[in-house]
Image (cartoon, grey):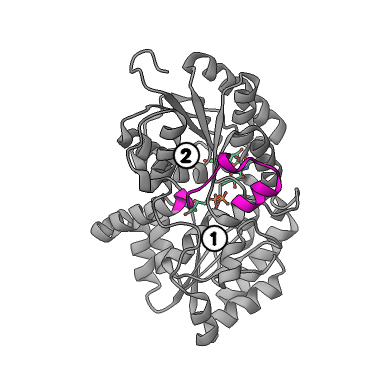
Amino acid sequence: MSAETGRPRMLVTFGTRPEAIKMAPVVDALRMDGRFDVRVVVTAQHREMLDQVLEIFGIVPDLDLDLMQHGQNLDELSARIVTRFGAALDTEKPDRVLVHGDTLTTMMATLACYFRRIPVGHVEAGLRSGNIYAPWPEEGNRRVTGVLADLHFAPTESAADALRAENVPEDAIHVTGNTVVDALLATRNRLAKKPGLAPIINALRDQYADRKIIAVTAHRRENFGEGMRQISAAMRHLAQRGDVAIIYPLHPNPNVKKIMRSELSQIANIALIDPLDYPEFVAMMEASEIIITDSGGIQEEAPSLGKPVLVLRETTERPEGISLGTAKLVGTDSARIVSEASRLLDCPSAYKAMSLTHNPYGDGTASQKIAEVLAQQSGLQVKDAQAVS
Ligand code: UD1
Ligand code: UDP
């Protein structure tokens, strides 16, 4: 309990771009709720990409650990997080910590809490591919987090089932939807009112007005090397069609940026650009015909916008889009990527079948549900009974 406010102290932590986008609505919901003392501590595992999100969502962290180093490796980054976040816990003294997803920030912050017996709520809990090397190291990170957390906010029923299969107690699991849908819908509304929030994409859309836009991202560690080479070969091939433009915001990880720059710079109809801030990226998804990506979050966003997703992976922990038919696993073989993309571009019935506007990952109310569960857990009076699942 915070001595100053007399309210339970909830410490929200995150460090990478996707965690920040997905935790921003949670921070907002907890602050709007008024029953909590909310603290935000960022590891800054990502520096520039985190700052882009903090600025867009108007979040000023209470503490910024500033931990990113260029070309960081998993061992050193893990050690920095557990040490520095652990020290932050000793001064912040939270009643509970909220972590998100499956990054090193997630797992190492959880470990630091465990060492101090501070309870952890895991947002986006229960995603499983069943293969600890795909995605790597994310599947390991989220499993460890799942073992140590005592509250699990599962985005979907199938994520909740995965937790049940690991013997997580039923009363510790809450199905809330994914908070990324909260962030996406709010940002889409902002963009509708203020299209000037996306000047880069507005300019590219004008430049490529006579072409179909393909939005591309790739950053998974298991795709480094040969996978990235195959993806770049597929992009070169698709760009030669003449009726498409590929917009590709490059992830700053040197294992991605270096190879993509050397393979794809100066190729007609490919725009290699810096990471986009979130409104720009949402505008890019809206402007695109199809999305080709190995990202987790983008698989969850695209169905709200009715955009088919070709997933550059062999497996996914997000089976809902595959079952619904809005996403398809295509791996990283360049010929396969080109043939699947061409099918969508050339065959209207194939396109129609994959472009349903229905999102199985959430309805925009996940953060509010999480706030209500946390209030109940803290013994606070129920404010909105309907929000609790
Ligand atoms: C991390 C997460 C991954 C998540 C991804 C989202 C781990 C192990 N990996 O992978 O789960 O899907 O973020 O994007 O937690 N860099 C910058 N500026 C930035 C961000 C990164 O320059 O704003 C560069 C730095 O050189 C950094 C490198 O990218 O060392 C790698 O960053 P890191 O967080 O270790 O790995 P990601 O590949 O980004
Ligand atoms: N995103 C963004 N700008 C970009 C690329 C992605 O804002 O240039 C957003 C995207 O909308 C999604 C999140 O970042 O919400 C996904 O991040 P990433 O693919 O890096 O990580 P993953 O979801 O795979 O962990």
Q: Secondary structure at mark 1?
A: helix
Closer-to-camera residue (273/355): 355
Of the residues shown, which amino acid type is indicated by label 1?
Gln
Query: Which of the 4 image quadrants contains residue 158?
Result: bottom right
Circle 2 is placed at which residue position?
Answer: 50
Circle 1 is placed at which residue position?
Answer: 299
Q: Position of residue 183 (x, y in %)?
A: 40, 50
Position of residue 160 in the picture relative to residue 56 (left or right):
right
Tell me which image quadrant ligand 1 sits in: top right
Q: Is residue 219 visible?
A: no
Q: Is residue 8 above or below residue 275?
A: above
Q: Position of residue 247 (x, y in %)?
A: 49, 64
Position of residue 12 in the picture relative to residue 125 (left or right):
left
Q: Is residue 386 above or below residue 216?
A: above
Q: Are marks 2 and 1 in contact (CB under 8 Å)?
A: no
* Mark 2 → mark 1, Cα distance in angstroms: 20 Å
Q: Secondary structure at mark 2?
A: helix
Q: Identify the image quadrant of the N terminus.
A: top left
Q: Is residue 153 above or below residue 357?
A: above
Between marks 2 and 1 in the image, the one whose residue lies nearer the viewer: 1
Closer-to-camera residue (239/49): 49
Magenta stretch: includes residue 46: no
Q: Is residue 110 visible?
A: yes
Residue that appears at 43% across and 56% down: 281
Magenta stretch: includes residue 178: yes
Specify which label sits upstream in the sequence, 2 or 1.
2
Label 2 residue near ligand 1, CB within 8 Å? yes
Question: Magenta region: which residues?
Answer: 160-180
Of the residues shown, which amino acid type is indicated by label 2?
Leu
**What label sits on residue 253 in the rendered view?**
none
